[in-house]
Image (tube, helix red, strand yellow):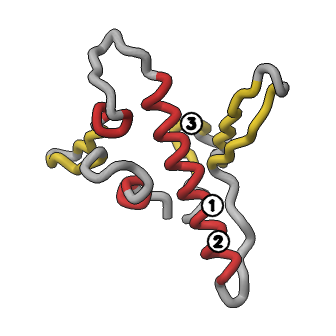
């Protein structure tokens, strides 16, 4: 299952924590290493989280391939190098199944 604990393994120590009262805190200062305010760019922090999700997806798929019998890979978060030689960029693709009866209110964890 894709859990916050599993994601935390791919982020800097202490950057994701359960603070009680049904609250999980992402400390973007620790994730990026930058001093942040609400007016700071969100791009680096979001990309670091997407990178962690990409690494978690790869780890899950490696474990699924090693299972006996092997399990089909999941689709969750992928990273691709895109663009041109002169203007390269990363493309992250997040894929989440949905229950067609309730759409975004009932997304499906691909590992569940």
The span from disc 2 to disc 1 (Cα, nearest Å) is 6 Å
Q: What element carries label 3?
A: strand
Q: Mark 2 points at which residue?
A: 62
The span from disc 3 to disc 2 (Cα, nearest Å) is 28 Å
Q: Left or right: where does residue 60 sit relative to residue 29?
A: right
Residue extending farthest to the front is 86
Q: Earlier in the sequence, mark 3 or mark 2?
A: 2
Residue extending farthest to the top is 39
Q: Nearer the viewer, mark 3 or mark 2?
A: 2
Picture coordinates of residue 65 (x, y %)?
A: 70, 77
The span from disc 3 to disc 1 (Cα, nearest Å) is 24 Å
Q: Left or right: where does residue 32 sit relative to residue 95?
A: left
Q: Which of marks 3 and 1 is nearer the N terminus?
A: 1
Say which mark, if any, is on residue 104. 3
- Residue at 36% over, 59% down: 5
Residue neighbourhood size for the residue with mark 3, other residues' Cα within 10 Å, grouped as few (<14), some (14–19), many (≥20): few
Residue extending farthest to the left is 20
13, above or below 67, in the image: above
Residue neighbourhood size for the residue with mark 2, other residues' Cα within 10 Å, grouped as few (<14), some (14–19), many (≥20): some
Picture coordinates of residue 96 (x, y %)?
A: 63, 46
């Amino acid at each position: 299952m894709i859990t916050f604990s599993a994601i935390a393994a791919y982020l800097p120590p202490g950057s994701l924590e359960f603070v009680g009262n049904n609250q999980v805190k992402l400390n973007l200062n620790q994730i990026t290493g930058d001093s942040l305010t609400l007016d700071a760019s969100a791009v680096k922090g979001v990309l670091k989280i997407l990178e962690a999700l990409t690494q978690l997806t790869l780890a899950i798929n490696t474990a699924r391939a090693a299972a006996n019998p092997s399990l089909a890979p999941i689709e969750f978060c992928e990273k691709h190098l895109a663009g041109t030689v002169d203007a390269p960029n990363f493309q992250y693709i997040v894929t989440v199944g949905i229950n067609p009866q309730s759409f975004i209110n009932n997304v499906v964890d691909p590992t569940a």
